[in-house]
């Protein structure tokens, strides 16, 4: 819900104090023009070593299990769901949890457990697609910014700063109001919201890598810009990008749920967790299960991705802060 | 001091101008003709042209931008395209109400978050510390609209201690503010803990301890003072969280603030109202961040000379 993705770079830039140039409001948070941004991995780990470090962290393993079960649930939804998520039953409206409906029935007598199981598909798809958008834009913009520097850097980073000047959720509301209340707008809104964060870390890491000797060596033997970036720079961004993707998955799922809760995301009758909480809100007194279980699903899912991200960060790069 | 202030103030001008440009451009990105959408199916071409002209949408972009900025400088946010009321009037009450909610949440977040963080760092790896680390991660993971509903369920429906929503005395403010503050409490606790841990390793802390300074003084003065910069940085970022998240808390608790207005504006396609609301909140955020930056100079005198 807040911005955990920013925390390690914040911490680093914060430790250094406000950035040296006071050009923009958000520059301070950016940790602008510093090589230390994003905590670039300065050493290489083998897969086995990473897994060994990851496994030792109990919370991280819990996160991995939650995420794993979630993916399984989304893939096997039709086989796992005890009932058709769309089937209505007037007599069963707002039935409390019990033998027939594990988690009760909603205001149309639909099985909440089945709707939760199918809802995981939406959460994961919106999360993955929006992170993919942010990842693509972020890597392209961040790498271009770091590689060319100068005016290109200024133009890209100041434009992204503008996106960050919109308080949380507001940018998404603007995008949705512009493009209309549709699934595509939600995905794009969440993706755009996450882009500046990705661009910044990638820029920070690329700057560090460009200063390494092997890049100079590659250039000296005549490697083209594209080759240097594709062969030497981007592969080294991998661990940071993986960690941030997990963190942004958590926040993308939260943001999608929030938009749907406000009625600005997915439309009924699609089983969306946020939407289910919103409808359950009207019967909180007489049927609290309608709103509480979907909310719990969101919380557990997001917690899973947060734990996974924390564990990945510690395992991939123990030198990243926090 | 003065050149530092001037430089910071000047630096916010392009950001504000950029926000205005972005917000103004949103109308151009609306698929189809926004004016036709606004007027509905029965609109004739003549009506569309007339409304377009009255909104100034027939002008070239630079002209529109200059006029828009000119009106904003005079505090004129235009009129609602739905009910014709002045946007500034519709927003002024809502803005104050939201600031009240955000301010209360900020106070709660700072007091609880920083206190918990300090003790977590002091008793590092203790039961309390481990609990804080897990609970704070959970706090970051809970959707605040759900946190709010659970609070209503417990404190209004079951215990009947607090009202479910609306405005009124302080008892109406507690739950919306706590709900809004939850992720920020978690974030501040994590940040304070890690910043304090860093400082507590320093030599001067050991020196203070060796010469017999009370623990309370070491933590509250020597250590906290030096851990403040990262904490304040996170606080600045959390302001966006508080301002934007207020939309959710307000919806849950029927709190008549900016969030309610914005959601209504989106649903009724009231573009001028939406633009005005977004501009107001974004500007508030920028100004708050400016204040946070300025506070660095107070917290750490070295900042000014850089």
Image: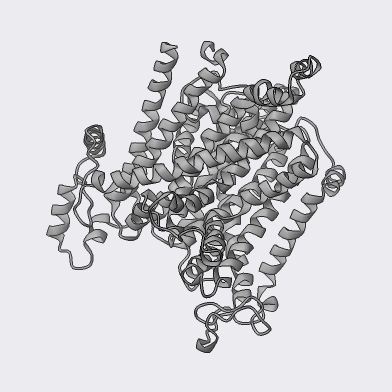
Identify whether A315 is placed above or below B233. Answer: below
Residue A292 image offset from top left, x and y in percent: 58, 66
Task: Report the side of A93 relative to B267 (left or right).
Answer: right
Q: Position of residue A264 (x, y in %)?
A: 43, 60
What residue sits 71% from the left and 44% below the top? B132
Say above or below: B62 vs B267.
Answer: above
Relative to B218, B182 lies left or right: left
Q: Quadrant of the N terminus of chain B?
A: top left
Please say which color scheme the image uses.
one colour
The quarter of the rendered structure image containing the C terminus of chain B is top right
Q: Which residue shows up at 24% across the image and 59% down it?
A: B38
Percent coordinates x, y for residue B293 in the rendering = 49, 25
Within the image, what quadrant is residue B218 found in? Answer: top right
Measured as percent of width and height from the top left, residue B248 is found at 47, 54
Q: Which residue appears at 51% of the width and 28% of the height?
A: A27
Residue A249 at least partly seen: no
Number of marks drawn = 0
Please tell me whether residue B108 is drawn above or below residue A223 in the rendered image.
below
């Amino acid at each position: 819900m807040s911005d955990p993705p920013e925390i390690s770079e914040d911490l680093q830039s914060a430790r250094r104090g406000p950035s040296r140039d006071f050009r923009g409001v958000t520059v301070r948070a950016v940790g602008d023009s510093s090589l230390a941004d994003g905590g670039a991995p300065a050493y290489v780990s083998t897969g086995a070593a990473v897994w060994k470090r990851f496994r030792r962290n109990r919370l991280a393993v819990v996160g991995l299990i939650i995420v794993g079960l979630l993916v399984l649930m989304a893939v096997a939804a039709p086989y796992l769901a005890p009932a058709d998520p769309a089937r209505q039953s007037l007599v069963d409206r707002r039935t409390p949890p019990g033998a027939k409906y594990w988690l009760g029935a909603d205001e149309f007598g639909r099985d909440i457990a089945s709707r939760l199981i199918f809802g995981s598909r939406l959460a994961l798809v919106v999360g993955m697609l929006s992170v993919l958008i942010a990842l693509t834009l972020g890597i392209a913009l961040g790498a271009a910014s770091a590689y060319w520097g100068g005016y290109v850097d200024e133009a890209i980073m100041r434009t992204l700063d503008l996106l960050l000047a919109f308080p949380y959720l507001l940018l998404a509301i603007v995008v949705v109001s512009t493009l209309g209340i549709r699934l595509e707008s939600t995905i794009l809104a969440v993706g755009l919201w996450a882009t500046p964060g990705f661009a910044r870390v990638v820029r920070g890491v690329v700057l560090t890598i460009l200063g390494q000797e092997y890049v100079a060596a590659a250039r000296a033997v005549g490697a083209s810009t594209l080759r240097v970036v594709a062969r030497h720079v981007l592969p080294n961004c991998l661990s940071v990008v993986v960690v941030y993707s997990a963190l942004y998955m958590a926040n993308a799922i939260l943001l999608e749920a929030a938009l749907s809760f406000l009625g600005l995301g997915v439309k009924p009758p699609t089983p969306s967790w946020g939407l289910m909480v919103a409808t359950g809100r009207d019967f909180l007194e007489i049927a609290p299960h309608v709103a509480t279980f979907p909310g719990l699903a969101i919380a557990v899912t997001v917690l899973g991705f947060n734990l996974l991200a924390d564990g990945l960060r510690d395992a991939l790069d123990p030198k990243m802060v926090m | 001091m003065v050149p530092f202030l001037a430089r910071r103030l000047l630096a916010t001008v392009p950001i504000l101008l950029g926000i205005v440009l972005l917000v103004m451009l949103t109308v151009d990105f609306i698929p189809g003709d926004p004016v036709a959408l606004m007027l509905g199916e029965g609109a004739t071409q003549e009506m569309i042209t007339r409304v377009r002209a009255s909104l100034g949408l027939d002008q070239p972009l630079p002209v529109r931008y200059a006029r828009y900025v000119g009106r904003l400088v005079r505090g004129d946010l235009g009129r609602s395209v739905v009910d014709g009321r002045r946007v500034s009037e519709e927003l002024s009450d809502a803005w104050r109400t939201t600031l009240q909610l955000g301010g209360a949440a900020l106070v709660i977040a700072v007091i609880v978050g920083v206190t918990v963080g300090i003790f977590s760092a002091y008793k590092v790896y203790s039961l309390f510390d481990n609990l804080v680390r897990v609970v704070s991660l959970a706090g970051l993971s809970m959707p605040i609209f759900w946190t709010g509903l659970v609070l209503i369920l417990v404190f209004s429906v079951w215990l009947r201690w607090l009202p479910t929503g609306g405005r009124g005395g302080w008892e109406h403010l507690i739950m919306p503010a706590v709900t809004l503050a939850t992720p920020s409490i978690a974030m501040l606790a994590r940040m304070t803990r890690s910043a304090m841990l860093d400082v507590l390793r320093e030599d001067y802390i050991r020196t203070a301890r060796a010469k017999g300074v009370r623990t309370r003084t070491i933590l509250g003065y020597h250590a906290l003072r030096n851990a403040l910069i990262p904490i304040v940085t996170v606080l600045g970022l959390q302001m966006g969280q508080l301002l934007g998240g207020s939309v959710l808390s307000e919806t849950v608790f029927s709190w008549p603030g900016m969030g309610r207005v914005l959601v209504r504006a989106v649903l009724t396609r009231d573009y001028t109202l939406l633009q005005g609301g977004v501009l107001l909140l974004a500007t508030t955020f920028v100004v708050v961040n400016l204040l946070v930056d300025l506070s660095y100079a107070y917290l750490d005198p070295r900042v000014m000379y850089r």
